[in-house]
Amino acid sequence: MTLPSVEALRSAIGLRTEEAFETCRTALSIQPHPDDTEIAAGGTVAKLASRGVKVVYVTVTDGGAGTMDPSMPWEELVRIRKREQEEAAKTLGVSELVWLNFRDSELRPTLELRNRLITVIRRYKPDVILTVDPWLPYEAHPDHIAVGLAASEAFFFSNLAGVNRSDLEMGLEPHTTRYIAYYWTRTPNHYVDISDLIEVKRRAMSMHKSQFTEEIVELLVRYSELLGLRVGYKYAEAFKILNPLALHVNPFAEIL
Ligand SMILES: [Zn+2]
């Protein structure tokens, strides 16, 4: 007996990775900190926005831990990082920013976090959610793992009326998001050619002045170049795109 191909396994659950970005009209990027989306998916966001896709950022933590300067007050850094994020998002063509304001560096994948994300998903009704892959080996940052896990749960549960029922009382309805696109992933199944957008991405990353020196920005650009080498693009961003049927009792999800 021959094993089914990856294509057959994908087709069995209706997973068409190309479709996720090509057909979407609203994209929600659920990021741990101000700056993550620019680094991991800035070119993709710019590409979507230029096509008229409504892109909404949901930033989960306030970013107040991101400094090595002991004299920098937490609240002051939060203000600076919000401003930097607003400017970077504007550069990429992002439509709207949502701030959940959890405390930076202390995030856990709690029920509260999951339910807050479900409410946001039901409000904006995205076709695709971009977020961190929480199963990246050696990822040590708790905020990244927590956001990836909570966003996966929220993606999976936001269409169930019985979950976070208080949303329904607020007039929100259950919503099915067709795809989740994980960035910083070990097993990408989709690459976006961002060769024409690398300068916009570089500019957006450079706006996070409190976080990155020019050397770091160049290193991050280099990552896009290295990802591109895998698929023959000059610069690329890599995603693991899955649908709800891949995210539960699916023993093949890793290879999809
Ligand atoms: Zn981060």
Image (cartoon, grey):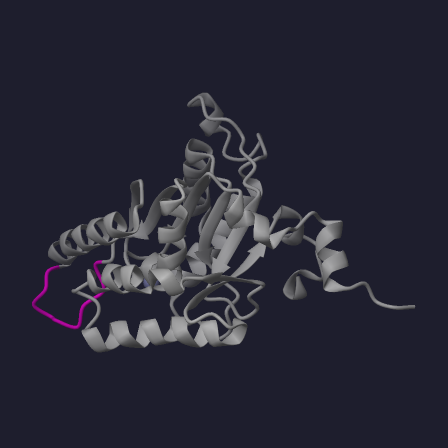
Q: For the image shown, how many numbered marks are present on the structure?
A: 0
The stretch drawn in magenta includes residue 70: yes
Residue 194's image quarter? bottom left
Image spot of residue 100 (x, y percent): 31, 45
- Point 64% across, 65% down: residue: 254
Instruction: Tell me, yes or no, if residue 109 can be seen here.
Output: no
Q: Is residue 34 left or right of residue 122?
A: left
Q: Is residue 255 left or right of residue 106?
A: right
Q: Quadrant of ligand 1?
A: bottom left
> In the figure, 117 relative to 35: above or below?
above
Instruction: Tell me, yes or no, if residue 163 can be seen here.
Output: yes
Image spot of residue 44 (x, y percent): 41, 55
Residue 236's image quarter? bottom left
Image spot of residue 159 (x, y percent): 57, 35
The stretch drawn in magenta includes residue 133: no
Say which quadrant the C terminus sits in: bottom right
Name, please, the residue furthest toward the front: 196
Residue 207's image quarter? bottom left
Image spot of residue 53 (x, y percent): 41, 41
- Tell which of 14 and 246 is nearer to you: 14
Say which quadrant the N terminus sits in: bottom right
Q: Give the residues in magenta.
A: 64-73
- Point 51% across, 54% down: residue: 181
- Tell which of 122 and 198 is nearer to you: 198
- Tell which of 234 and 112 is nearer to you: 234
Name, please, the residue furthest toward the right: 1
Dominant SS of magenta comes to: loop
- Point 36% across, 43% down: residue: 56
- Point 19% across, 73% down: residue: 213
